[in-house]
Image (cartoon, rainbow, N blue to C red):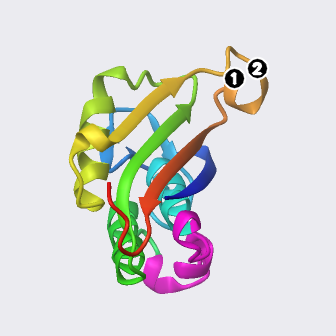
Amino acid sequence: MRVGIGYDSHPFAKGRKLILGGVEIPSAKGLAGHSDADAVAHAVTDAILGAAGLGDIGRMFPNDDPQWKNASSIDLLNKAFLKVQQAGFRFVHADVTVILEQPKLAPHLSAMAECLAHALGADSAHISVKAKTNEGMGWIGRGEGIAVMAVATLTGPGGAV
């Protein structure tokens, strides 16, 4: 069994769609970033890459490479997962916490879990997505952006679930 931790944060930006976990969330602001800035998909990508010992999202999909400009982060997650599989690992579970003040994510959590699961070749029962506020504290509390933490477990070559 291997465990990886992922983290990502992005500031809000006007004129962009808010994509989280592969789901477009109705919002006046999206997230700034080179790709679609899906911080949920980025954190999960780092978690699976870390568990497999394959580095991180920045090394695999550098933000100074024009081919990743406005890329779908769910597609990047799937590409990373294919590398994880090629290294002999199987996905077991991911636990994700999204930290933001607004918008409220409760109505979208199931769709996010479904989209992430699809990218990971898993059932949505193997993905937990939660949303928390920062209780008005700090840059997140002021509504300047969001942060996401993710933990993923994989089984190694020949490992059973």
Answer whether residue 18 is visible to the viewer in this image.
Answer: no
| Image position, residue 64 (x, y; %) | 61, 81
Q: How many marks?
A: 2
Q: Is residue 62 above or below residue 47?
A: below
Decide which of 33, 13 is in the foreground and name it: 33
Decide which of 9, 128 is in the foreground and name it: 128
- Say which quarter of the image contains residue 129: top left
What residue appears at the point 37 percent right and 70 percent down from the top-left corner? 81
Give the structural element (helix, strand or loop) at label 2. loop
Q: Check disc 1: other Cα within 10 Å, few if <14, some if 14-19, many if 20+.
A: some
Quadrant of image for the C terminus: bottom left
Provide the residue designation for mark 1: 141
Decide which of 147, 116 is in the foreground and name it: 116
What residue appears at the point 68 percent right and 30 percent down from the top-left corner? 140
Q: Is residue 94 above or below residue 50?
A: above
Answer whether residue 141 is visible to the viewer in this image.
Answer: yes
Query: Is 140 colored magenta in this rendering?
Result: no
The numbered dot on residue 101 is: none
Q: Which residues are magenta?
A: 50-68
What residue appears at the point 48 percent right and 39 percent down from the top-left corner? 96
- Residue lying farthest to the top in this orientation: 135
| Image position, residue 84 (x, y; %) | 41, 74
Provide the residue designation for mark 2: 137
Q: Is residue 28 left or right of residue 112?
A: right
Decide which of 115, 27 is in the foreground and name it: 115
